[in-house]
Amino acid sequence: MAGNLGTPSAAGFAPRPEDGRPGARPWEDAEPQAKKLRSGEGDAPARKLPKRKIVLLLAYSGKGYHGMQRNVGSSQFRTIEDDLVAALVRSGCIPENHGEDMRKMSFQRCARTDKWSWRATCPCLSSQGVSAAGQVVSLKVWLIDDILEKINSHLPSHIRILGLKRVTGGFNSKNKCDARTYFYMLPTFAFAHKDRDPQDESYRLSPETLQRVNRLLSCYQGTHNFHNFTSQKGPREPSARRYVLQAYCEEPFVREGLEFAVIRVKGQSFMMHQIRKMVGLVVAIVKGYAPESVLERSWGEEKVDVPKAPGLGLVLERVHFEKYNQRFGNDGLHEPLDWAQEEAKVAAFTEQHIYPAIISTERGERSMAQWLSTLPVHNFHATASSGAKVPSPLPGSEGNGESD
């Protein structure tokens, strides 16, 4: 569990278990090359290496982490970037001061995948960070020999660098990203009618129900005002309007006797909690708690009660760079950022690390079944303008989800 991972040092890194002493920074036991980079002794060959802007294709399981993004000096728990930056320092790709101040290496991520906790007040439930199969980060590094192998040698098996490509000097992975694809993996009993046992593991999704789920998901496609699918956004704020390119549910499959399905959503960008609320509202409609008309009503200015599905199962699958590829992908100097050659590695990592973490956590913590039991408290017929009270989220159910 994340709470057992230690207290961060002043630089913002949580000490790794192998450091073997309290307060140790992750690179203090680094290999000789990294020590030389820090001390300035015998590092002339390394310093003559060119520093180049690259992107890394990153996959990770978020279980046991409090999100992707590092928060130097204030985070009490380990993040994915804590381990990633420590590995970059240890491998000799960057000097220590770049690890302490990530701006020095122009570090940028395509999207945040933040931590969530089903019940933040319940210590018996672990914190599960949103995972990623195809996160992309941009940064400047020394292009050392065997760079991928060396970085991965200092990472745990549930964090892998699957690819590396050179990009233009001014490239920023967040700003150059045209679209992002997430998937949400959930047990299909979430779509069973409300009169059925909310955790009946024998439930199997029928073709008719799958067709209805996809019809409802297709309503999200296009440009809509998603102010009801996030928090702290007013109905007239331009940033609440988002463009969704695709939203669909794939054929279900069985793992460990439990049937699961994967919902894929592709959009230009997503607001905090948006995908989880998109999934939550479709589930509420299919189960019979909410009328289909609530979807159309949610685009309006009134405040509509939209439930937020658990964060477990949400995965950043792919990020897209169509405009960059059109301009630089075939210029003879840079490769297109499509990662076609790495697709097999991405699929293997998903099967080996992400799916098992979701399944084991769902079985152990029953997050979907517990969340389904809260749907009756929602009032899907009321709006804030009608004078009826729209209930607040349940205590402890607020957590961070997808956001760019």
Image (spheres, rainbow, N blue to C red):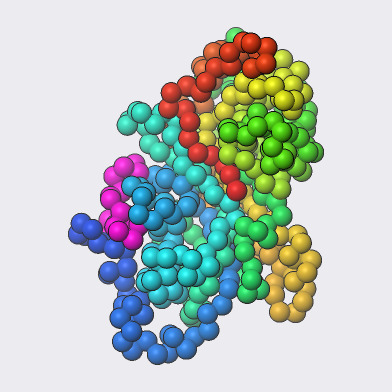
- The answer to whether 42 is drawn above or below residue 204 in the figure is below
Q: Nearer the viewer, residue 357 or 111?
A: 111
- Direction from residue 394 to residue 55 in the image, left or right: right
- Direction from residue 372 to residue 242 in the image, left or right: right
Res 327 seen here: yes
Is 10 magenta? The answer is yes
- The answer to whether 227 is drawn above or below residue 33 in the figure is above
Q: Nearer the viewer, residue 174 or 338?
A: 174
Q: Quadrant of the N terminus?
A: top left
- Residue at x 57%, y 28% (from the top left corner): 308
- Direction from residue 399 to residue 252 in the image, left or right: right
Image coords of residue 171 (percent x, y):
64, 68
Image coords of residue 11 (percent x, y):
33, 61
Q: Nearer the viewer, residue 261 or 4?
A: 4
Is 138 magenta? The answer is no
Res 261 seen here: no
- Picture quadrant of residue 204: top right
State whether the magenta stretch is mostly helix, strand or loop.
loop
- Residue at x 47%, y 89% (from the top left corner): 48
* Bounds of the magenta segment: 1-18
Image coords of residue 193 (percent x, y):
63, 14
Image coords of residue 95 (percent x, y):
40, 75
- The answer to whether 25 is drawn above or below residue 373 in the figure is below
- Residue at x 47%, y 52% (from the top left corner): 69
Task: Find the residue positioned furthest to the left.
Answer: 21
- Residue at x 65%, y 21% (from the top left corner): 304
